[in-house]
Amino acid sequence: MIAFMAASPWGWTQTPGTVPSPNDPNIQVLEQLANAQDGVDYAKVQTAIERAVKSSFDATAFNAELDSWANLVRARVSKGAPPTEVMTALGQVIYTPGPWNNNRPFSYDLDDPLGAKYQNKLVSTYLRTRKGNCVSMPTLLIILGQKLGLNMTLSQAPQHEFARLQDANGRWFNIEATNPGSPPDSKYINELHVTPLSIQSGIYLRTTTPQETVAAMLEPLEGIYAHTRPPGYLLGLAKLAQRIDPKNAAGYVNEANAYFLTLTHRYLTHHLTPEALPPMQRADFNALYGANTRVMNRVRAMGWAPPTQAGDKEYLERVDRYRSEHGK
């Protein structure tokens, strides 16, 4: 048993339930950007996320491309144009085929509608392929919108993200990026089965601050960390999301995932149960299980629920209808 623990891929500590916490410089950078005194710069945040995924990421080219898209929109509107007019121009440049986008408009990725490939949620992938999802598509909108002087943030619904825009009168409007338009909250409530509890707790359909939007922007990196890094990296990122936005459901879900991944690597993949373990390892198993359960109970009490097969089927049926209606 001792030999097994020494060979564990993520190591093991004498303190039961502890997940080794690496010194992740990416978390430090992202936290600084989220708390910047001169305000949150979405482009800088996304650049840091892309660099966290790939250290050799070409940040200069990425930001030049973002500026190029913003300039295309800027050339279409008069100085001082109201936010709704700027938003309309932004949508035309992004979604309407024409010479401004080389007749390659951005559109929903019908080949990966659930965003199963976590790399597809990155804005860099969206820019390269012009195919996006409910994470990359609204994120690009808020980045470009901010460059154009718009007040925009990200809001969330079950397994979905969308943008919000503040108009000249201070009112906030939903901006749906996957099927361009401005649907009312009721559409999200009905189609995505948003519960009153989740709205009351603030995890869904809430207008976030720019700082809180950073927590939503972390979603692709959380997925990548979960698949490619030891659990301690995911735990650190989840804790960051909670510090930035205590109502960010994904922060709690990913904290719980980090405990479960550690439990899996240490014990479950080896078919070890508490009864078969020496006292110290049994205490570790129970502490990790308890931590996972405690955090999941907390986020469930906020109205979060895991995806269901029925829900995925319903969503894919809507995708199929969209495909048929648009001849794709």
Image (tube, rainbow, N blue to C red):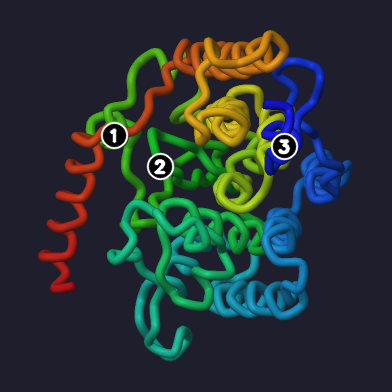
Q: Which x, y percent locates residue 227?
A: 56, 50
Q: Which x, y percent locates residue 172?
A: 50, 38
- Mark 1 or mark 3, whichever is nearer to me: 3
Q: Residue at x 56, y 64 (%)?
A: 123
Q: Is residue 98 above or below residue 225?
A: below
Residue that numbered label 2 is attached to: 160
The three-letter code of the residue at mark 2 reads: His
Q: Secondary structure at mark 2?
A: strand
Q: Is residue 9 above or below residue 297?
A: below
What is the crowding at mark 3: few (fewer than 14 residues within 10 Å), some, or many (at least 20)? Answer: many
Q: Is residue 91 left or right of residue 246?
A: left
Q: Residue at x 58, y 48 (%)?
A: 152
- The front one of 307 and 168 is 307
The three-letter code of the residue at mark 1 reads: Leu
Whether residue 244 is visible here, answered yes or no, is no
Q: State yes or no: discs 2 and 3 in contact (Cβ < 8 Å).
A: no
Distance from disc 1 to disc 2, alpha carbons, whole Å, reads: 9 Å
Residue that numbered label 1 is attached to: 192
Q: Is residue 213 left or right of residue 38?
A: left
Mark 1 or mark 3, which has the lower sequence index? 1
The three-letter code of the residue at mark 3 reads: Gly
Residue that numbered label 3 is attached to: 232
Distance from disc 1 to disc 3, alpha carbons, whole Å, reads: 32 Å
Whether residue 119 is visible here, answered yes or no, is yes
Q: State yes or no: discs 1 and 2 in contact (Cβ < 8 Å).
A: yes
Q: Is residue 114 left or right of residue 39?
A: left
- The front one of 259 and 209 is 259
Q: Residue at x 74, y 76 (%)?
A: 58
Instruction: Name which quarter of the figure residue 12 lies in.
Output: top right
